[in-house]
């Protein structure tokens, strides 16, 4: 679901956004800029939770160790 938001910008900034990004694309542009900053906190918490799963960590280490051998014979 989308929500409407009213923000205030300097008119020079708005004019440049309008010129560079184009009509009807400013909202998407701003959302794409803001989203990673908000989701980074959720991602960090998810990584911490995954790291606490000891069985998963053992499996991940085994997988990583197994794949190291795959690239050791690769030419550079």
Image (cartoon, rainbow, N blue to C red):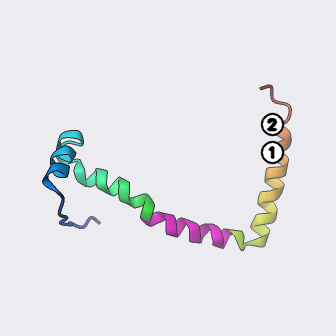
Residue labelled with disc 1: 67
- Residue plotted at (43% across, 66% down): 38
Q: Would you place residue 43 above or below residue 11 in this image?
A: below
- Neighbor class of circle 2 (other Cα within 10 Å; few <14, some 14-19, many 20+) is few
Q: Which of the 4 image quadrants contains residue 36? A: bottom left
Taking the image as shown, residue 30 lies to the left or right of residue 66, namely: left
Q: Main secondary structure of the magenta part?
A: helix
Examine the structure image and report whether residue 47 is included in the region drawn in magenta.
yes
Q: Which of the 4 image quadrants contains residue 72? A: top right
Taking the image as shown, residue 23 lies to the left or right of residue 72, namely: left
State the SS at label 1: helix
Percent position of residue 53, x then y: 73, 72
Q: Which mark is residue 33?
A: none
Taking the image as shown, residue 34 lies to the left or right of residue 52, namely: left
CB atoms at circles 1 and 2 under 8 Å apart? yes
State the SS at label 2: helix
Percent position of residue 68, x then y: 82, 44
Percent position of residue 31, x then y: 32, 57
Part of the protein shown in magenta: 38-50
Task: Decide which of 56, 28 is in the foreground and name it.
Answer: 28
- Neighbor class of circle 1 (other Cα within 10 Å; few <14, some 14-19, many 20+) is few
- Residue plotted at (36% across, 53% down): 32
Q: Would you place residue 61 above or below residue 6 in this image?
A: above
- Residue plotted at (78% across, 71% down): 54
- In three-dimensional space, the C-alpha distance between marks 1 and 2, rounded to whole angstroms, equals 7 Å
Percent position of residue 61, x then y: 81, 58
Examine the structure image and report whether residue 31 is included in the region drawn in magenta.
no
Image quadrant occupied by the N terminus? bottom left
Taking the image as shown, residue 23 lies to the left or right of residue 44, namely: left
- Residue plotted at (54% across, 65% down): 43
Residue labelled with disc 2: 71
């Amino acid at each position: 679901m989308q929500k409407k938001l009213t923000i205030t910008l300097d008119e020079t900034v708005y004019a440049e956004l309008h010129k560079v990004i184009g009509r009807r694309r400013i909202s998407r542009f701003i959302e794409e800029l803001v989203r990673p900053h908000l989701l980074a906190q959720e991602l960090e918490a998810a990584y911490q939770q995954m790291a606490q799963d000891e069985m998963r960590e053992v499996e991940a280490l085994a997988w990583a160790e197994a794949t190291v051998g795959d690239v050791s014979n690769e030419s550079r």
